[in-house]
Amino acid sequence: MNGPGLLLALVVSGAAGYLQYRLIVDNRGTQILPQVDEEFRQIRYKAEDPRLAFDGGSAQLVHEAREYEDRYQRTLIRVTRYARNAHGEYFYFMSEGTGKALFRHISQAAAEAALGRKYISPP
């Protein structure tokens, strides 16, 4: 095999190996995303003031951000969500799919700062 043919063979072999690696590598995102979704849907918070009540099954998801372990986005490590209830109140949710999600009500000012153009004023 001459120089250009050998170079072409190495490039093709490298590309094939990389594609195989990307297809075979364990993608944790496929494992934690269903858990995160379930954690979010199961949140039920009843408050004395009905404006502050939250039901993850009926809440409007305004924004979702996924954080990955590496720049190739192979391993999902954290999901952050901003959601609204029927009264226009905002809630912050963050989970790593471990069953220990962080969930809290946030002020309108904090929601507006975090969401920018996605922010919707309460009715």
Image: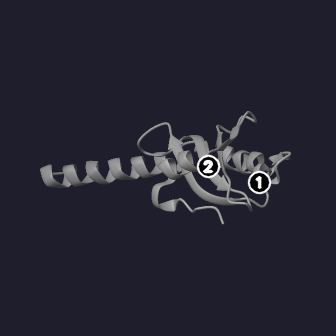
In primary-sequence order, the first of circles 1 and 2 is 1
Density class for disc 1 (Cα within 10 Å; few <14, some 14-19, many ≥20) is some
Density class for disc 2 (Cα within 10 Å; few <14, some 14-19, many ≥20) is some
Between label 1 and label 2, give the one nearer the viewer: 1
| Residue plotted at (61% across, 51% down) | 82
Residue 59 against residue 101 in the figure, above or below: below
| Residue plotted at (68% across, 54% down) | 89
Q: Is residue 30 found left or right of 110 in the rendered image?
A: right
| Residue plotted at (84% across, 45% down) | 47
Image quadrant holding the C terminus, namely bottom right
Q: What residue did someone put label 1 on?
A: 51
Q: Label 1 sits on what residue type?
A: Arg
Q: What residue did someone put label 2 on?
A: 81
The one of 105 and 99 positioned closer to us in this rendering: 105
Q: Are marks 1 and 2 in contact (CB under 8 Å)?
A: no
**Residue 13 point in image, percent of width and height:** 34, 50
Give the SS element for disc 2. strand
Task: Spot the residue most to the bottom.
Answer: 123
The one of 62 and 108 positioned closer to us in this rendering: 108
